Amino acid sequence: MSSNTAISRREWLENSMFAAAAASVGPSSFSWASESLASAPSETIKVAVIGVNGQGGSHLSSLIKRPGCEVVAICDVDTEIGQKKGVDRVSKETGKTPKFYQDIRKLLEDKDVDAVSIAVPNHWHALAAVWAMEAGKDVYVEKPVSHNVREGRILVDTARRTGKICQTGTQCRSQKGTIDAVKWVHDGKIGEVKLARGLCYKPRGSIGAKGNYQPPKTVDYDLWSGPSPVVPLTRPKLHYDWHWVWPTGNGDLGNQGIHQMDIARWGLNVSDVGKSVFGFGGRVGYSDAADTPNTEVCVHDYGEKTLVFEVRGLKTGDLKGAKVGVIFEGSEGYVVLTSYTSGSAFDKEGKKVRDFKGGGDHHGNWLKAVRSRKKEDLNADILEGHLSSALCHLGNISVRLGEQVEIGEIGGRLKNLPASAVTGEAFERVLKHLSDNNLGRETKLSMGRHLTIDSVNEVFVGAGSSEANPHLFREYRKGFEILRV
Ligand SMILES: NC(=O)c1ccc[n+]([C@@H]2O[C@H](COP(=O)([O-])OP(=O)(O)OC[C@H]3O[C@@H](n4cnc5c(N)ncnc54)[C@H](O)[C@@H]3O)[C@@H](O)[C@H]2O)c1
């Protein structure tokens, strides 16, 4: 876990420019030598849950009473949450009191812990997972697996180098309804599929006015900030609302949206980050302490195939019955997923031909792979998590680098970009949606940059790349650097 091999963003950028120029050399000039350090854990897999406020509670529900698994430790930088929602809960439900750690580094020194289940904020995901694997633990890490593209790739490389099992927290990958629907698409049952739409139509209100606020006294704020700069808190709520500011979150595209982005990419059968990306969006309808868009469309161009993602944070209806869902458009019909566990297939005339339904056990799948030591047993190996998380980051980068224009202007600008018919239609629906929320054509959104991607090296190339590439990585605060690979 030493940080003396840390790489600065500038160093990485210089190297990645070189890598982009010399693509034939291989996927990354930073690849670890492959070396498996995998060892089978003890019969009972001893797990620590890291971060137990919201989603960590779901991890506990899934792990606490599972045969062959014991929650032996809880880690949370908020001592009150760690005690009440972690230690007390496990004690009450199992009769055994787990150890408590506030500092993840101390937890990772604990030889009694075989594996960790991570549910901390996004800016900590990759670093916590890399440190854990370096310390010999298998990992379940929440989505998005990274806060930026480059650290996601470092995470994949670390899993491969250490031979550790690393599952992404996109649980739809283990849900029967979703698995069957994607198989239906892959089996050609709706013909040729060149378009997938991911939808995150999830209204959310203001997070409160920007101001000067104090983190809860029970939180070690320096540790909470981790790799991110320690800055005065300018939103009312520390926990959860970090999603809506760039230093720690990735907006709803990287919050709810990553689940649907992942299913859309999986169904399209594409295993890289695409040829180019562009998007448009902004935070409209109210002004608050957040900076991420509540209205966003991003388009991932895979040449023959297109993935269009729409985020709506204002009051909205559905599209083909889906609000938070995925739509695959085929030459012979379409498939709509309307939840994590259900959806339906339709023929060209819109007649339903079958339903998909059923859940699954994502933590169970992880533990099975921890026992077998085979990453192939995972339903959501970290590579899948990295690629889908990267798509969210790339869309956000385009929008963040954009130019503020009146929305009426955006339609014209889309005409010269890839998949113009599809994106033009998405744009018209955004216009109507904004108008339904009393926002006229004079409302300003960011018209994002159209950025070309070298998908082998996972860097931007060509026009706009010098502004965009720095967003693929971050400056890691001293002591919280991600290891060099
Ligand atoms: N898979 C899903 O369906 C799903 C659903 C909800 C949330 N999530 C993911 O789970 C993660 C947590 O979300 P949440 O809503 O519970 O957030 P939250 O902010 O409510 O809770 C995060 C907890 O982590 C703790 N924490 C922060 N940094 C820590 C560190 N370095 N070490 C130990 N503890 C730390 C905080 O004190 C807090 O208790 C997010 O990444 C989110 O995207 C996934």
Image (cartoon, rainbow, N blue to C red):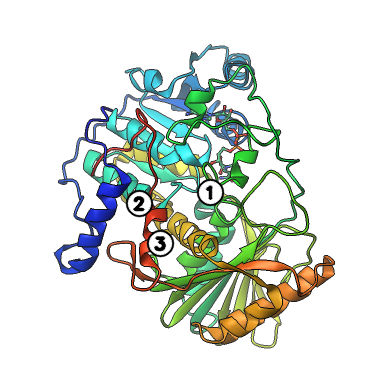
User: Mark 2 and 3 residues: CB-CB less than 8 Å, in contact?
Assistant: no
Judge left or right: residue 116 versus residue 357. left
| CA distance separating discs 2 and 3 | 16 Å
Secondary structure found at label 2: helix
- Name the mark on residue 150: 2
| CA distance separating discs 2 and 1 | 23 Å
Query: 366 or 389, which is in the foreground?
Result: 389
The N terminus lies in quadrant: top left
Query: 105 or 384, which is in the foreground?
Result: 105
Percent position of residue 231, x then y = 54, 32
Q: Nearer the viewer, mark 3 or mark 1?
A: 3
- Name the mark on residue 467: 3
**Residue 88 quadrant:** top right
Secondary structure found at label 3: helix
Q: Which residue is mark 1?
A: 171
Quadrant containing ligand 1 reads: top right
Query: How many residues crowd mark 1 within 10 Å: few (<14), some (14–19), many (20+)?
Result: many
Label 1 residue near ligand 1, CB within 8 Å: yes
| Residue type marked 1 | Gln
Q: Nearer the viewer, mark 2 or mark 3?
A: 3
| Residue type marked 3 | Glu
| Residue type marked 2 | Arg
Residue at image coords 52%, 86%: 416
Query: How many residues crowd mark 3 within 10 Å: few (<14), some (14–19), many (20+)?
Result: few
Residue at image coords 77%, 69%: 434
